[in-house]
Image (cartoon, rainbow, N blue to C red):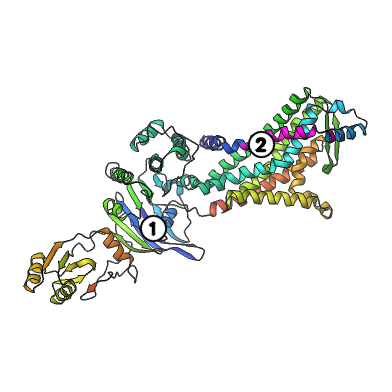
Amino acid sequence: MISIRGVTKRFGRHLAVEDLTLTVPRGVIFGLLGHNGAGKSTTIGMLLAQVMPDAGELRINGCDVFADRATALARVGAIFETPAFYEYLSGWRNLRIFCEYTAPAKEERMREVVKLVGLEERIGDSVGTYSHGMRQRLALAQALLPDPELLILDEPSEGLDPEGIHETRNLILRLNREWGLTILFSSHLLSEVQQLCTELAVMREGRLLFAGDWRSLGAERHWLRIRVDRQGEAERALLASGLVDEFEYDGRARLAPHADVPAIAAWLTTHGYRVEAVHPVERTLEDFYLEIIHSTVGAHCVRPRQALNRDGAHAVRPYTGSEGGE
Amino acid sequence: MMFRRQLHHELVKLFARKRTYIGFGAFVVLQVLILALLQLPKARQAFDKLLSSNGYLPEDYYAGLTLAMLIIEFTIFLMGALYLALVGGDVVAKEIEDGTMRMVLSRPVSRLRLLQVKWLACALYTGVLMIFLGITSLATGLIYQGRLGQLFVYVPHEGLFGVFPTADGLARYAIAVVLLAVVLQIITALSFMFSCFKMKPAAATILTLTVMFTDFVLRNVPFFQSFQKYFITYHTSSWVRIYQDIIPWWTIGESLVYLAALGVTFWVVGAMAFCLRDFKS
């Protein structure tokens, strides 16, 4: 659906995006993660032909977004962090204006979309009276009006209350599952991305650090939380025993391939440690993200933070940009 | 069809804003104020003296048409450039500042088309504002004096002194207002061009006013008399040349061509800046 090849963008002396190559397959909810200034918004801006790249090529559905902007963006909807509208006009008039820059909007379609986002009651009111959540819903409505195949959402949950975040999440899932929309989703809220995205890309300082299915990375590795009375001593002893490959913060341990929970518990008891807890832990996106983002080497190698490491080997699959289909 | 629809929406946006009407309201207030100032004894005496010393009866000319001409002349001098620069400076830069431009450009509309629509909306606004000014100035004079009377025109910096019977005066007044609506497009165009660059709406307005003011001042410096025809304000003044005894159509035509060429240049420069710039939050 989206193909980005070798894209570089500078703003003056600041390198915003460097040699970015990324593919977003059709039908997925794809997360774009990174700190402020990582290059996410610039990438989205380039995808919408709002920011001109210095080098590289961006394609949507096989069409170059700069050479054939009309075709490439014909079925793309976009929402930005702070959606802006003509405050003095009604929501309905705003939808008409935004939509009819490219094609006349059928009233029936407009009503359908307004109903979907739950704005029927207030669509006739001026946008100046809308709350932030209502503006986000109106933004979603304008993005959905051209019957898109691809939705680009730049921080859609920013500034929403928990209920609003929940509603937005459900709507995004629904749009993906029921309407079959491909969704490119940029957010600071890792929990949102974790719940929504099947695949993601992590950027830092304009560079791509990772792209793909983050859950598959390290799925072969089993993680436990181990709590004993003499924690530090036990960690060193377990590493030496070969049952544990690595310790992270807070007693999180990566087991050696041949080890399991009973074996660890038995070993600790046998060696006189008073066991408080030994249980499997699921690796969260936050763990994954922090691990990636704190790497010092770059896109090909990640060093876990504060890790006690037995053999020092901890590699992330290098991203070549050739994975996934369009 | 699509262009008409886009233009319709652009005009809806423009005329649905309260600030758009500030210009209209301000002009009406200024017209009444100028009328009141013209009633001051000293102003009235100067008017009477000017006419009687040239062998004309002041009563014949101190009526609706002459007052309308005086009002429009002062109003344009005081506020014309300001309000046109405000609207022209707002139309692109304000949308960029507010973020609505980014929303619009997420649709596959061409940037050039967008500018064309906005430019045309601005041009229409300028035209409507000037016609409104012409009509309300005449209405103000007419309501105050109750008759059109004959027309007396005096524009010292153009070396213009003219008297016209009612019918001829009214016809010339009408042509002058239409011409005013055309020549002042250049101020909107200049402001529009600046607003296409990366700057705040206020900066576009201030730059436009600076250019116009500098142009006006330099034009009136004796050393630059021989360069008169290169100054914008020389050509924007062509609307008052309608009141010369024999209308200098050729000179007026030259001015219109000069302003049109300048307008096209502003458009091209503005469009290039707009099409090549990045839009980012």
Q: Which residue is mark 2?
A: B26
Is A146 on the left-hand or right-hand side of B61?
A: left
Q: Nearer the viewer, residue B16 or B173?
A: B16
Which label number is shown at residue A4?
1
Residue B34 included in the magenta stretch of the image = yes
Chain of the residue displaying label 2:
B
Is B125 on the left-hand or right-hand side of B243?
A: left
Residue B233: horizontal and vertical position, in percent? 75, 46
Which residues lie in the magenta part?
A: B22-42
Q: Residue at x 34, y 71 (%)?
A: A296
Residue neighbourhood size for the residue with mark 2, other residues' Cα within 10 Å, grouped as few (<14), some (14–19), many (≥20) = few
Residue A304 sits in quarter: bottom left
Callout 2: SS: helix
Residue B26: horizontal and vertical position, in percent? 66, 36
Q: Residue at x 38, y 48 (%)?
A: A159
Q: Farthest residue toward the top? A: B146
Q: Which is closer to the viewer, label 2 or label 1?
A: 2
Residue B104: horizontal and vertical position, in percent? 48, 44
Chain of the residue displaying label 1:
A
Callout 1: SS: strand
Query: Given the image, on which type of amino acid does mark 1 rest?
Result: Ile
Residue B47 sits in quarter: top right
Tag 2 and tag 1 share a subunit: no
